[in-house]
Image (cartoon, rainbow, N blue to C red):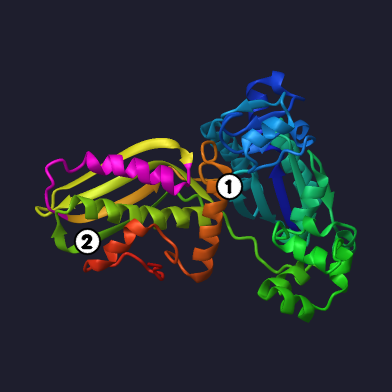
């Protein structure tokens, strides 16, 4: 019988800000931009009482709670605290999956024989709270879905175990929106079917859900019934991601080089978001026709936004070849990677931009990378080398 632990730092960004400034404790605090521009990256439970939630426009949050305290936030501090928590967990468990900057899955299967999975989970939680000062909740059950939902039910700063055999009964009393993946699109359809509670979903035939929702219907039925065979994927601390290309003929066209770099940035940024990474460093490598090679890099606030990364890369590129020498090879990469939420530019982007990128990412995940991309990058396909590995829309 599997034993899967899910741990989630409560209102992580806000919790870090409270540690830095204890006077914020108990107040409606919002991290992410300003009251005039930006999105809510994180908010305190005091702010949530007003209906504020992550990814909401800060202008709306200000209307809902005029007394809210808005903080731009510091991803460097959040990355540091995330690493401290990760190290504490990694030293004490056999298999760890870090799914985001503040969320962890742990496979404790077999630990009951030696220590006790629930006791170990409590020990880790207490250690994190003592050594970092951060509140953290956990759920323990036989699979990832039930453990994650149990964590949600245990919040804030609590814990809950759902023993083997009790998964279905535990889920039955919950609202369908508690199931991961049931959101703005799926819930209205379920509501039209008269489905509000998980217990009602459990009573449906799996074939009926498959007919209504396709493959996701099968996934939905399994989750509602507490079935999830997905493994905990071991955590790897990836440091960088890059891509480069040697041209068949040396290139002197500055516009084409810029377009090519934009294309590479698009692909790498999509891959980064897909794997839940953020970067704080962009670098470009350029090799000239005489094989002389130069590299430059620039630092920035942690992001996975195409717009931000492309802007930095263009500036960097313009400074690397002022004499427009023939270029044999061009490469682009991101370093100083950390796990982060799949929000685009966490502190500066708009709610509409985030929804746009989420939609584009969903299309590219389903039909292949570069199914949808900037019109500017279409022309790179006219050269000898085509950097696109998906279909192009022209």
Q: Nearer the viewer, residue 80 or 11?
A: 11
For the N terminus, the quadrant is bottom right
Relative to 2, residue 105 above or below: above
The part of the image, by quadrant, that contains residue 393 is: bottom left
Relative to 163, residue 302 above or below: above
Residue 269's spot in the image, x, y percent?
44, 52
- Residue position marked by numbered label 2 in the rendering: 246
Q: Nearer the viewer, residue 312 or 143?
A: 312
* 244 magenta-colored: no
| Residue at the (69%, 61%) spot, across then down | 185
Is the residue marked by circle 1 packed among few (<14), some (14-19), or many (20+) residues within 10 Å? Answer: many
| Residue at the (88%, 59%) spot, across then down | 170
Which mark is drawn over residue 47?
none
Q: Nearer the viewer, residue 12 or 68?
A: 68
The part of the image, by quadrant, that contains residue 381 is: bottom left
Q: Which residues are magenta?
A: 303-327
Query: Is the Cβ of the residue at disc 2 closer than 8 Å to that at disc 1?
Result: no
Residue 47 visible in the current orientation: yes
Along the horizontal axis of the image, is 322 left or right of 119?
Answer: left
């Amino acid at each position: 019988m599997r034993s899967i632990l899910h741990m989630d730092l409560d209102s992580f960004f806000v919790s870090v800000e409270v540690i830095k400034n204890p006077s914020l404790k108990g107040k409606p605090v919002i991290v992410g931009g300003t009251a005039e521009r930006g999105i809510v990256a994180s908010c305190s439970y005091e702010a949530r009482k007003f209906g504020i939630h992550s990814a909401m426009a800060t202008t709306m949050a200000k209307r809902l709670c005029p007394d809210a305290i808005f903080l731009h936030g510091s991803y460097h501090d959040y990355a540091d605290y995330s690493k401290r928590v990760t190290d504490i967990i990694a030293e004490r468990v056999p298999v760890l999956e870090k799914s985001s900057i503040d969320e962890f899955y742990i496979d404790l299967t077999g630990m009951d024989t030696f220590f006790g999975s629930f006791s170990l989970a409590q020990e880790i939680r207490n250690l994190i709270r003592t050594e970092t000062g951060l509140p953290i909740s956990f759920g323990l059950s036989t699979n990832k879905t039930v453990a994650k939902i149990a964590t949600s039910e245990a919040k804030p700063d609590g814990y809950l175990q759902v023993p083997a055999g009790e998964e279905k009964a535990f889920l039955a009393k919950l609202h369908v929106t508690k199931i991961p993946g049931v959101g703005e699109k799926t819930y209205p359809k379920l509501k039209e079917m008269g489905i509000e509670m998980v217990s009602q979903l459990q009573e449906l035939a799996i074939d009926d859900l498959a007919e209504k929702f396709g493959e996701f219907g099968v996934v939905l039925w399994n989750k509602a019934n507490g079935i999830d065979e997905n493994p905990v994927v071991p955590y790897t601390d990836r440091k960088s991601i890059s891509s480069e290309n040697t041209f068949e003929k040396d290139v002197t066209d500055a516009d084409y080089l810029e377009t090519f770099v934009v294309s590479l940035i698009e692909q790498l940024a999509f891959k980064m978001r897909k794997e839940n990474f953020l970067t704080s460093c962009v670098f470009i490598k350029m090799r000239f026709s005489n094989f002389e090679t130069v590299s430059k890099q620039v630092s920035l606030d942690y992001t996975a936004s195409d717009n931000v990364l492309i802007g930095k890369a263009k500036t960097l590129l313009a400074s690397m070849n002022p004499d427009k020498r023939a270029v044999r090879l061009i490469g682009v990469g991101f370093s100083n990677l950390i796990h982060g939420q799949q929000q685009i530019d966490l502190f500066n982007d708009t709610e509409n931009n985030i929804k746009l990128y989420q939609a584009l990412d969903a299309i590219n995940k389903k039909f292949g990378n570069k199914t949808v991309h900037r019109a500017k990058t279409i022309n790179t396909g006219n050269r000898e080398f085509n950097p696109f590995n998906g279909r192009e829309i022209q």
